Amino acid sequence: MITLLMIMSIKNGILSSMCLASGGIVLIAVLGFALRLVGEDSERFVPGITVISTVGLACLVGIIIYWLGKLEISKFIIDEVQLGTTVRYSKMMGYVAGGLVLSIFVSTAMVWSASQLGAEFLIPTVEYSNVIFDGPLILLSIISLAIVVPISEEIFFRSYLSKNFYELGITSRIVLTAAIFALFHAGQLEVIVIASTFVTGTILGYVYHKFNSVTPCILIHAGQNLLVICITVILN
């Protein structure tokens, strides 16, 4: 009976991941097609398309959790973000800071190592300035990338998927959800992106199980994305 429950739970988690990936591909394809219709001025619409896609994926996460997980989404989120009464906030923030620093260090070390080894082709070339609004509208980019994305992704990958893989044990859950998280961010199959995202996912998974809450994971994820936005603004 336990084996059957394990198989069904894992199957539901994998199916949910496939639905999110498929839905994301369709959404991006549709928005990309709409962008091409604009023509030469398409670049100035990219930040807006980015905001729409992040909100769309967040909605898709809610639909999947409700439809496949058969969960009341609002109650599920509230339960997952709650911290236990015994949790010390100073300790939690210490883990948040540590997780943020460690994930950034690992990513930077991978890029530096590739550069030193002459493997620049492994280093992703992403122009974040193209997907972030200029001026006052940057607030929309901050809301979508540093609030909507961290909440929706951590609720899905750390909370929902982890619960689907409950029968596997904590270590296996952390590794499996981190692997799916990394593949979801594979983009053009950049090795460093996949590897660094896997490490970040592992850190987030550990923190999630440490506090039995997704809140510190959201804070780490939000910190990473906000840092990218700040650096992009400063450099441009």
Image: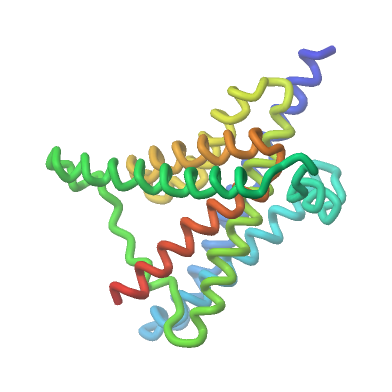
Residue at image location 12% in from the left, 42% down from the top:
118
Q: Is residue 236 above or below residue 107?
A: below
Q: Residue 168 or 233: which is nearer the viewer?
A: 233
Left or right side of 226 for 64: right
Image quadrant holding the C terminus, namely: bottom left
| Closer-to-camera residue (1/91) | 91
Q: Within the image, what quadrant is residue 70 found in?
A: top right
Give how far across and how far down residue 50 sits, in percent. 51, 69
Give me the residue at 55% from left, 64% from top: 146
Q: Residue 9 lies in what quarter of the image?
A: top right
Q: Quadrant of the N terminus?
A: top right
| Residue 50 shown left or right of residue 111 in the figure | right
Residue situated in front as seen by the camera: 119 or 233:
233
Q: Position of residue 142 (x, y in %)?
A: 53, 71
| Residue at (53, 36) in percent of width and height | 178
* Residue drawn at point x = 57 percent, y = 66 percent: 53
Task: Judge left or right: residue 228 versus residue 171.
Answer: left
